[in-house]
Amino acid sequence: MSSPTRTIIAAVVFALIGVSAFLFAPSREIAVVLNLLLLTVFLFAFEVVGVDVAAVSIMVMLGLISHFGGVIALPQPLVSGRELFGGFSSNAVISIIAVMIVGAGLDKTGLMSRVASFIIRVAGNTEARVIPAISSTVGFISSFMQNVGAAALFLPVVGRISARTGLPMSRLLMPMGFCAILGGTITMVGSSPLILLNDLILASNKALPPEQQMQTWSLFAVTPVGLALLGAGIAYFVFAGRYVLPGNASEDVTSGGDVMEYFRELYGLDYAVREVLVPPASPLVGKILDDIEQPYRLRVIAILRGSDDLRMGPTREVVITAGSVLGLLGAPERLNEFVVAKGLHLRDELETFADQLSPSRSGIAEVVIPPGSELIGKSARDLWMRKTYGISLTALHRGGSTLREGDGVRDLPLQSGDALVVHTSWEALAHLEKDKNFVVVTTEFPHEELRPHKVNAALASFAVALVLILFTDTLLSISLMTGAIGMILLRVLSIEEAYRAVSWKSVFLLASLIPLGLAVETSGTAKWIAEQTLLLLGGTPVWVIQLAIAILATFFTLVMSNVGATVLLVPLAVNIAIGAGADPAVFALTVALATSNSFFLPTHQVNALLMGPGGYRVSDYMRAGGIMTILFLVVLMIMLNLIF
């Protein structure tokens, strides 16, 4: 069956269900809201339009229905005009905007690049090791701060790791986001529902006799449950990730594959970057770089001597010492020949220079000597090209022929029209674009201006936001916006860079769904669905009722805020538990934990945040999130009944 046919059939089925809602719903408002919910699920599931366009369309439709409600006999608007666009100024949306800016500021200083380097150094570059390293780190962080904040701060880190390991962002971001949500279940301050839970318990106690009153939960009371949920999430992606995660190829133009193919076809060049260790017995010890580069037609593009003498694009007179680590550029067969001849230890992957020689930081580029260049008549050796311009000449194309290292390329006087193939950092190449002595042909590279001198300013802005979040009752949005504006005022980011750091698709998706969640709650739809579900469970075992409450909380958190779902369901859960002879505090905790089970649709703040950068579709969340939703419920029920 073709995709358009399936969509048409589904539309007919959803429409029939929507029409029947007017027959069994207790009020016109509830019937209308149920139809809007059905339409939202249909648009999301079948992606008739983009998910952000669908969300905005539902918001506009909700506004029109509220304004012209008299035509369909609505006694009052579903949402007021003031509330309709209130999502754009909501605490959640402003928090997302602010945390994206804070994360971009930290990344601009190179701090996130260092974190990425550390994770790669510890975990390597395989998916089975990188995913647990990222996910466990984010899960731990989100146990003490808002999960959307933890996810947004690690978004640039995952981007760096993706660029350096070649692993697609789509296979790293979803596990990171899901585990950020799961991490919020580890402590009672990890998510808004858990923070709110003790207040709701105290409010419920006022209506209960002394013998039925509940104790509040301590900070780490939920830790065993949360750790089990986080562990299950990590294990799920490690063992099943290859089947459920989308395999989108990385869209990063710096990955190097297409670039090297270009140089292979145009100049017949085949380069690889390898890392070798020089043992004490190697004949290279005591030699200078100039002694080894030309005979073996390779380039030393990085060297580490001792523990702290690291040089990128080292000059030709640098002496090689015992224990040095060399970053080599050359044809694979010549590199292997060189390693064997000089008794070097070849590493399987970049370790020492994983950051500096990653495709996101450096690579092969092409520059041309224009007429009028001051370099004409001078050789690369005369100019000390590596030292002066930060570029390592590897080949020169002139008059239809290509000269390489070993052909005396560094001793040739440059001529107008010479095409130079060089290895360089992208930062150095960006500077060459402003130099009239060169014409930079390679244009698709990261024009990234890092500001390491601003690291203290960035950390100070972040620290202020963190202190406000952890040690005061300041709104999350105000706390994070304090850090964001600090990044701008202290010139870590320009205001234009701050605007570019925001994923506006995520903002519109989340802001547009907030009024729908409000309508679900204020129209009585959520309460009616809960009551009807629980009426059907009369006389069933306690664990079945508890599972039903967890499923209800899961459903509500997909279509409304998790805070709203918690406020609505905790009083119902407490009363049901008392009637069934169960522990009302455990039932209340079940609700607060189950509202984190938000993986099936990209409606959670974290999922909305990552949808754009990961290139995800709703179907990706349904596939990976559907199984995660069931796994969450199973682990939650087992742990709650084992511990409490």
Image (cartoon, rainbow, N blue to C red):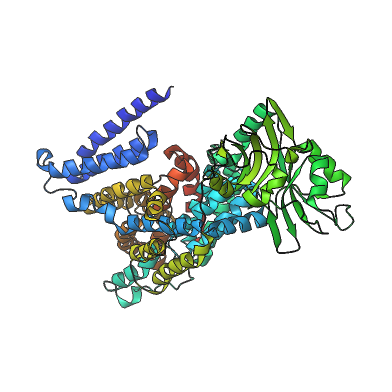
Left or right: where 339 falls relative to 450: right
The percent coordinates of residue 404 (x first, y second) are: 74, 35
The percent coordinates of residue 596 (x first, y second) are: 42, 56
**Residue at 59% in and 40% down:** 255
The percent coordinates of residue 157 (x first, y second) are: 54, 54
Q: Which quadrant of the structure image shows residue 470?
A: bottom left
525 over 404 or under it: above or below = below
Left or right: where 131 falls relative to 79: right
Kindly give the residue lying farthest to the bottom in the view shown: 210
Q: Which quadrant of the structure image shows residue 413?
A: top right
Nearest the camera: 100 or 321? 321
**Residue at 29% in and 57% down:** 90
Nearest the camera: 55 or 188? 55
Nearest the camera: 397 or 58? 397
State whether residue 80 appears in this view: no
The percent coordinates of residue 127 (x first, y second) are: 62, 46
Count of numbered labels shown in the rendering: 0
Quadrant placement of the N terminus: top left
State whether residue 555 appears in this view: yes
Nearest the camera: 141 or 196? 141
